[in-house]
């Protein structure tokens, strides 16, 4: 009985951890791959238990080689489970970040940043639709007070909700920043102009009401994830560009922001259309066509939409400082996007930092306590302090 259980147990663990290193054949398995890559050491502990079972079989009465198969399988599973941690060690050393096992294993216990609440306000009403934002106020007094972060959610430009990563908003507030987590229109599509227009409208509304929130209008940074990261980059890089106007009337403020943070953003949309990531997980061509109005090879007009909506097309010597984050196993947005943006920013001498997390999947930061998140929290805080401080 122990022999059969040991073999089945080791196979289950192996079949779970294997998705850390191989592409998922379906969306649901991609979701599972995010979980197992971010909490891999938990599975590693089960692998150790499976190895112990193998040695128990070896020490039992009767000669049998049955222990060899589960031992090999569970050992391979253990090595795969260690990959996320081992792969980030050089990056952690480079960024001078001490990785914490106690924080990592606290990830299943619950959110520690309790007591930080938010309020909700409407910043625009368009076509009868209210666009709202959640506001997290700083919980401490420090030099970051007065600076604010506008957070833009992901969802392939056609889904998603604000406040989808609340633990990060609470953490930013706990470090003295005021956080605004905003809506934008996700329908009807094509919506690239309305979505970016809504983001810019939020920037202007927040600046115009800065006194109410005790913030300084010239100390604002943008932070986006996936499609929201694309919009964050585009909003920062096209401030006051009449081709991509705000969706609300301007008053006295300008759209310029101090800095922008991009988590796994597509940055060259024409290239992304021709070079999609894992099409078993997401139909990248269909997603881009819906957002931008069609196939860029169909007409000059549609191709111009792709060009206009491509952040790298708008980089100049006046571009805002940028922090780029991407994962090595991203199956939604190919890693070349980070390289394209990094090169273009270097060419224009823009202050920026590019952080490539070798093991990470798209959405890795959903695990607030994971290895990737531990590194990014340290890097991001330093970046924000440097680029939103009082001038």
Image: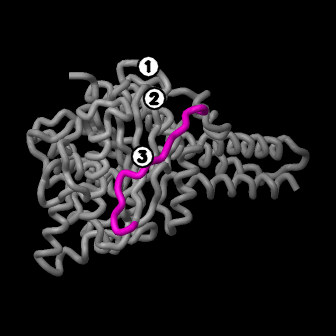
Q: CA distance from mark 2 to mark 3?
A: 14 Å
**Which stretch did the figure color magenta?**
114-128
Residue found at the far top of this picture: 142
Residue 291 position within the rendered picture, expressed as x and y whole percent measured from the top left: 30, 69
Residue 90 in the figure: left or right of residue 258: right
- Tell me, for residue 196, which label it has, or none: none
Q: CA distance from mark 1 to mark 2?
A: 7 Å
Q: Is residue 300 visible?
A: yes
- SS type, badge 3: strand
Q: Which residue is mark 3?
A: 181
- SS type, badge 2: loop
The residue depicted at 14 percent of the width and 39 percent of the height is 346
Residue 118 position within the rendered picture, expressed as x and y whole percent measured from the top left: 51, 40
Graded by Cα atoms within 10 Å as few (under 14), some (14 to 19) or many (20 or more), the crowding at tag 1 reads few
Give the number of callouts.
3
Above or below, 114 relative to 78 = above
Q: Which residue is mark 2?
A: 138
| Residue 71 falls inside the magenta stretch | no
Residue 161 position within the rendered picture, expressed as x and y whole percent measured from the top left: 47, 57
Above or below, 62 relative to 148 = below
Question: Quarter of the image containing the C terminus?
Answer: top left
Question: Quarter of the image containing the N terminus?
Answer: bottom right
Residue found at the far bottom of this picture: 298
Q: Are marks 1 and 2 in contact (CB under 8 Å)?
A: yes
Of 333 and 81, the residue lying toward us? 333
């Amino acid at each position: 009985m122990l022999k059969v259980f040991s073999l089945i147990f080791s196979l289950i663990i192996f079949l779970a951890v294997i998705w850390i290193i191989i592409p998922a054949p379906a969306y649901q398995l991609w979701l599972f791959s995010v979980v197992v890559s971010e909490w891999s050491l938990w599975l590693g502990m089960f692998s150790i238990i499976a190895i112990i079972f193998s040695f128990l079989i070896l020490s039992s009465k009767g000669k049998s080689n049955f222990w060899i198969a589960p031992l090999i399988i569970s050992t391979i599973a253990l090595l795969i489970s260690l990959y996320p941690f081992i792969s980030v060690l050089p990056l952690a050393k480079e960024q001078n970040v001490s990785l914490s096992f106690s924080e990592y294993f606290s990830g299943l216990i619950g959110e520690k940043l309790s007591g930080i609440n938010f309020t909700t306000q409407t910043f625009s009403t368009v076509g009868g639709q209210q666009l709202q934002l959640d506001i997290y106020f700083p919980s401490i007094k420090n030099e970051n007070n007065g600076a604010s972060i506008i957070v833009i959610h992901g969802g392939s430009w056609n889904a998603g909700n604000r406040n989808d990563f609340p633990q990060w908003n609470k953490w930013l507030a706990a470090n003295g920043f005021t956080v605004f987590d905003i809506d934008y229109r996700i329908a009807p599509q094509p919506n690239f102009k309305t979505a970016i227009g809504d983001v810019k409208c939020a920037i202007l509304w927040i600046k115009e009401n800065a006194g109410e929130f005790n913030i300084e209008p010239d100390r604002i940074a943008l932070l986006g994830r996936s499609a929201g990261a694309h919009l964050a980059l585009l909003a920062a890089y096209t401030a006051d560009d009449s081709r991509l106007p705000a969706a609300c009337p301007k008053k006295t403020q300008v759209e310029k922001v101090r800095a922008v943070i991009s988590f796994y953003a597509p940055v060259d949309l024409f290239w992304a259309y021709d070079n999609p990531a894992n099409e078993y997980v997401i139909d990248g061509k269909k997603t881009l066509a819906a957002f931008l109005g069609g196939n860029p090879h169909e007409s000059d007009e549609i191709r111009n939409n792709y060009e206009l909506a491509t952040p790298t097309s708008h980089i100049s010597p006046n571009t805002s400082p940028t922090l780029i984050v991407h994962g090595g196993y991203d199956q939604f947005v190919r890693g070349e996007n980070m390289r394209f943006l990094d090169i273009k920013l270097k060419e224009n001498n823009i202050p920026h930092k590019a952080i490539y997390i070798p093991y990470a999947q798209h959405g890795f930061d959903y695990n607030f306590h994971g290895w990737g998140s531990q590194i990014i929290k340290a890097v991001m805080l330093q970046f924000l302090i440097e680029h939103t401080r009082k001038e």
